[in-house]
Amino acid sequence: MKFDTLIVGGGLSGLTCGIALAKRGKRVAIVAGGQNTLHFYGGSMELLGNVNGKDVDNPIEAIAQLNENHPYSKIGADSVAELAKKAKALLADVGIQTIGDATHNHYRITPMGTTKPAWLTIDGMATSDKADQLPWNKVSLVYLEGFIDYPIDFAANGIRQMGVQVETPTISLDCLKRARRSATEMRPTNLAKIFASTSAVAQLAQAINNSCGDADAVLIPAVLGIDNDDVCNMLKAQVNKPLFFLATLPPAVTGVRINAALRHYFQMLGGRYILGDTACKVVTNGDTVTEIRTTKLLDMPLQADNYVIATGSFMSRGLVADFEHVYEPLIGLDTNAPDDHEKWSQYGMMGDQPYMSYGVMTDGNFHPLKDGKTLTNAFAIGQILGGHNPVVMGDGTGVSMITALAVANQIK
Amino acid sequence: MATTQLTSISDHNFEQCLKCSICTVYCPVAAVNPAYPGPKQAGPDGERYRLKDPKFFDEALKLCLNCKRCEVACPSDVRIGDLIQQARMKHKSYRPKMRDMMLASTDLVGTMATMVAPITNFTLGLKPVKAVMHGVMAIDKHRTFPAYSQQKFEAWFNKNARDYQNTFAKHVSYFHGCYVNYNFPQLGKDFVTVMNAVGYGVHLLEKEKCCGVAMIANGMYNQARKQGEVNMASMRKSIDQQRPVLTTSSTCTFTMRDEYPELLGINNDGVRDNLSLATRFLFQLVDEGKIKLAFRPEFKMRIAYHTACHMQRMGWAIYSTELLRMIPGLELIELDQNCCGISGTYGFKKENYETSQAIGETLFADIEAAKPDYVSTDCETCKWQIEMSTSVKVLNPISILAQALDIDATRRLNSSEWHRMDA
């Protein structure tokens, strides 16, 4: 089977690159070995949140402080600024409206009630312009009876510490009681399937109106809108106070919606999305890739003019660590990880862990290196790239989208 | 210690579960039926407890459809569906009821029903009969039984097609499955038409039994295993004669390729690689330039393709959709990945009817919104469910191909070897 471009990996970077290429009329296929880490996205994208221990206000200006191996340094600040606009427009094209831009971070509110710098946030989510202030005096933080994985006390305390009065009414509805027969399944995405019905949304709106006394705003976990934001808007229209959604723990409704929206759009443009199949072998000839084999298509090789490797980091098996090596399992690309595994981690799990910035090495155009030589018709994009650190620097989603668009621009 | 980590592989990749919960997003049952604990709890989470003590087995696992959408979604390749099926095989206490055995014994019931097809079809459609089946047999009264054919496919083939199959240069065997044999011989006839047109003779297997998917679902594992062994023996003979085995049903194919070794412990070595879906076989031949297809210029059709759950699990939908896309007058819409809810015999049971229809609701709405001329899918039970629940008729891709091909022109394009054989 022959395509113009073959993308391995169906997450944010693979889909972004696929959409940009398919829009130009290219024949593109994406091979996705299972679902992706978009399912963990709580509704905000980060471009660059923290450099040298300090929150970043203007990510584009802060790129100058990054070292030369960071993917943004390879692209250059001006180009990143351009591509960031395109990324926001691409999300709008697929039906995801966001607030924010690349020259000024806002703050997203985490499920733990803390704030983090953000680049784009889905319209309707709770945000703030300041790290330590929220735009309300008193909020009603709604708890849905039986909802698991929602640390309401942490969230309430975190918000109180920013000088906001918080009340936490519990809302109980018949539809939630029925769902609680399966107590382990009271997750955000399963609740969103209940709240896909307009009658459930109306019941929820009424219960909120009955229980949120004199608060200036209502905050509710983002458990609505798994397909689109219609029911979110319906709820906002029916609640008689300003209402904002708060990020939840995974699987997050917001991320599932982004994933589905990107995939629909890609397929609508004629892109082929091969889900549940895993690239298992890449055939190379000198400095070019000639074909890819998958576990399900067996003797049918997938061939293309260009190959994009968007297989993600450790979680997505784009990178693998055993006792001896950190390696890229598909092609055996060069990584920036040292062989001495004592150096991979350090004390403090949530601290600056070296392994978080491990990934494959590329030249300035994101052609990956194998045995020190570049593969000329292959590109690496997204979380598989070394030299950045999504946890500490807050650059994960930005690197995924920006490198995807930068590579799509290079492919003729 | 290093060796332990590198080589230890647990049953169905159980130990690879990272607890990311992504599978729970895609379970069609948990979304509509809170009595089912969902794939994570029923699969890897529950398995940790069951390994300690079988008393942790939860009878609610029988509500699993075995659609495998959890496995397709899993980023860590944990075979969640297999874990659940295996737990049911190992621990379940309920016995298949009379009704379950009837639904699962497709060969027996199909043979009896086709003998008196007009009576069967008439009777099964009667309200009082439906009421009795609903009340006594617990087969839901809303269900329309697939009509039984008066003439089995095998009988048609032996009478009308068998004799000239040896005039072809290349040959395949056809595992037609119960549905083609008892309910819908037309699909089998279409298959023969298409294969003959591209220069392949079609043969039946020496012995063909139901693949056993319904028996597995209804807990009749020993019977399923026996039938599987018969199928494997017949297929080995066919493969020894250089005749690969083709099917037109994604579920039969998936069962015999993957469920036989994974769940029933049937050795299908040597068969698995030569057992394929007709659409995959044809696509590959075209892709490799070994056959050519000529289409009728006036053919026009708008198709909404539904990826059946087991087709999705096999990862072969792309063969069917790319084959359909070769037809110039065909407009293809790929429907979203949603289960239709029937899952073989599951949806026929009274206790599952509501769940079954609720699962399919999204797909039915998508189909109506797409306004296609036909839905296409590679699974026969999806066809029953979609035809019962929407206003649109369903065609297997092979039947669409049979309609779209200019048969004579295609024969001529592929006839060099055909003539050689003639001479």
Image: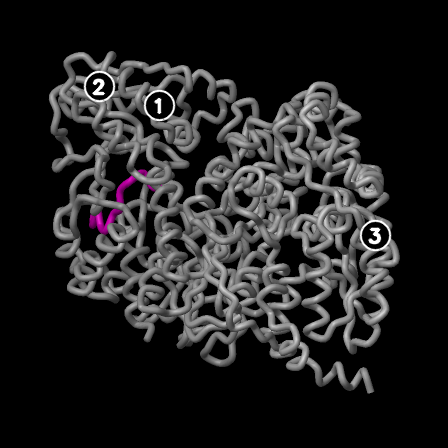
Neighbour tally class for label 3: few under 14, some 14-19, many 20 plus, Cα within 10 Å: many
Q: Are marks 1 and 3 on the same chain?
A: no
User: Which chain contains the residue that carries disc 2?
Assistant: A
Q: What element does badge 1 sit on? A: helix
The answer to the question of whether label 1 and label 2 lie on touching residues, with beta carbons closer than 8 A, is no
Q: What segment is highlighted magenta in the picture?
A: A41-52
Q: Amino acid at mark 1?
A: Ser
Instruction: Rate crowding at label 2 as few (under 14), some (14 to 19) or many (20 or more) other CA atoms within 10 Å.
Output: many
Left or right, B196 with reference to A43: right
Give the spatial CA distance, label 1 vs label 3.
Answer: 51 Å
Q: Residue at 16%, 26% (x, y): give it.
A: A242
Q: CA distance from mark 1 to mark 2?
A: 23 Å
Task: Name the quarter where the C terminus of chain A is drawn.
Answer: bottom left
Graded by Cα atoms within 10 Å as few (under 14), some (14 to 19) or many (20 or more), the crowding at tag 1 reads: few
Tag count in the figure?
Answer: 3
Measuring from the top left, give residue B156's x and y in whole percent: 81, 57
Residue A29 appearing in the image: yes
Instruction: From the image, give the main secondary structure of the stretch colored magenta.
Output: loop
For badge 2, the amino acid type reads Ser
Label 3 sits on residue: B208
Q: Which residue is mark 2?
A: A140
Give the structural element (helix, strand or loop) at label 2. strand
- Name the front one of labels 3 and 2: 3
Query: In the rendered structure, does residue A313 fall within the stretch colored magenta?
Result: no
| Residue type of the residue flagged with mark 3 | Glu
Residue B16 seen in the figure: no
Nearest the eye: A332 or B226? B226
Query: Label 1 belongs to which residue?
Result: A199
Q: Residue at x 66, y 40 (%)?
A: B82
Q: Image check: A338 left or right of B164?
A: left
